[in-house]
Image (cartoon, helix red, strand yellow):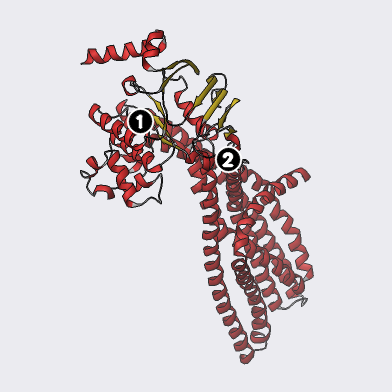
Amino acid sequence: MKKIFLSLFQDKLKSLKVLFFYLMPYRFQMILAFISLACAAVTILLIGLGLRHLIDEGFAHQNSDLMNQAMLSLTLCSLVLAGAAFMRTFITSWLSERVTADLRKDLFDHILSFDQSYLESARVGELMSRLETDISLVRSVLGVSFPMTLRSLIQILGATILLFMTSPKLTGFVFLVIPLSLTPLIFMGRRVRILTKQSQEKHGSLSAFIHEALLSLKSIQAFCQEKAISQKYDTLMMSYLDTTSLRGRNRSLTIALVIAIVFSSITFVLWIGARDVFHGQMSFGDLSAFVFYAAVAAGSLNALSEVGGEMTSAFGALERILEIKNVAPAIGSSGTTSLAPLKPPFVFYLRDVTFYYPSRPQIPALNHVSLKIEPGRTYAIVGPSGAGKSTLFQLLQRFYDPQEGSIELNGQDIRTLPLGFLRKILAIVPQEPSIFNASLWDNIAFSRPEASPDEIYKAAQLSYIEEFACQLPQGFDTLLGERGIRLSGGQKQRLAIARAILYQAPFLLLDEATNALDTESEWHVQTALDNAFKECTRLVIAHRLSTVLNADKILVLDQGKIVEEGAHNELLRLGGLYTRLAEHQFTTSCEEK
């Protein structure tokens, strides 16, 4: 018993600490809400005093003046109760919206700081479930359940005092009922909390599955897998419904037990009170007031049992939110090294770097790689799929840290540098650019929102976006749709190139940036890149070797190692992997022609 109470207390204490942290900036509104809530609770209790006065003084003595006074008092109590209820409802609703907005904002900002190693195992749908469903549950509890709990506790306390003042004997019987009423709330409430957390986790999995299915809808339809996906959805949905049904049964049983215990006990107490009235031991007004207070106490206990399940659900939701907030990013957002000595020209050094992805800890993505990246030069990175080309870019941007070796910038380990500084000097054109459901103009400006309109327009011109922008319904103001559905693959990559041009970084990372372009567009973009990044250091991951023939140095990666490096003609003379790749590509190209 002691362990159960201690565990329950510790779990809820952690959640309450977080909740009160977000409530404290609104302490004035909290005080107003508590005053209005307490005023409403006390007013309800005063109605019982007015009822006793009405019966004993008005009806019993047939005194119309006293009866009118009692009725006036009851009317005033009703008006005060209505006003207090309005204030309490308005303030708590306002407070719940503000607090959950702050909580959602902090959680969203925290998710933005997550490193890639965490996101490898996390599912977008589950994170969205915690941002939306769990926080909405907390909002509902703050706006309704929590105030109702406080009001019920005040009414139970006040009703108990007035019950004792009215009849200590009958109150003693009532006190025997309270522990019986709390027992199901304590023991079954813990079970409900566990089931609530399980149902929320299953809801998160269901949301993640729906999110993945919608993103993959074209593939699902192309491979005629609608039925299989629908069946999998049914399986996940039934698992979720089974858990919620079990939680509902437990909540319903808890409420039923509390109601049965409370009202059966009240009936017994009323029977004893009626006997006391017959024997002249208490007045009919006292019994009426006692019944009213008992009804208030019983109703408050019933309300506690009703909102107890919702409060339990909220604690389960807060636990899930805390799980996210307690995730510490493995990649720190601030460094320890002064930026004063780090001035251009910048030079990167990779010193015996070995890296394993967290999801593939047995296979090195990079294996003892050493490299010097000098300013103003163009480095081409080629090799078969899975050789570690894109991994090199991710390590330079510090989305991951190597398990062995180090990466240095001007002699400083990049792990000691602020992330903002490091990523500010690296512009990237990814293989699959992220396009937002915003205008074409805003998507270009995404990399540098503070850029002037002239700078944005120039970036669009250099990347040949202007050619297709005029064909869009609203030109640069056209919304591109979710994930840029209005654009072709080549247009998306031109947009990514425009972002990189606008970013104005000394390093340019091109991850197969022209792979989705036709030959003419590729020539235009290559010319644009040459003009826009004359002074930049360029690292180019290339699938088509024809795009890297003029690179200052070509790095050939295979199984995470640099197996060859040099200029195009030098590598051809070696007769190694690069030669085989070149022969295969150029032979295939000639056959296609």
Residue 57, above or below 455: below
Q: CA distance from mark 2 to mark 1?
A: 33 Å
The reply to whether dot 2 and dot 1 touch (C-beta < 8 Å) is no
Please tell me whether residue 7 is drawn above or below residue 581 in the rendered image: below
Q: Amino acid at mark 2?
A: Pro
Q: Given the image, on which type of amino acid does mark 1 rest?
A: Ala
Q: Which residue is drawn at the image coordinates 64% and 89% (left, top)?
A: 66
Q: Residue at x 28, y 50 (%)?
A: 477
Closest to the observer, 388 or 228: 388
The residue depicted at 58 percent of the width and 49 percent of the height is: 313
Residue to which mark 2 is pinned: 341
Q: Secondary structure at mark 2?
A: loop
Could you say whether the residue bearing mark 1 is in a helix, strand or loop? Answer: loop
Vertical order, 140 against 551 (above or below): below
* Residue 181 percent location from the top left of the image: 69, 55
Res. 167 in view: yes
Q: Is 13 or 511 nearer to us in this picture?
A: 511
Quarter of the picture containing the C terminus is top left
Task: Tell me the number on the disc at residue 28.
Answer: none
The image position of residue 172, as x and y in percent, is 78, 64
**Residue 227 in which image quadrant:** top left
Question: Residue 444: which quarter of the image?
Answer: top left
Nearest-to-viewer mark from 2 and 1: 2
Mark 2 vs mark 1: which is more N-terminal? 2
Residue sitting nearer the eye, 219 or 549: 549
Circle on res. 513:
1
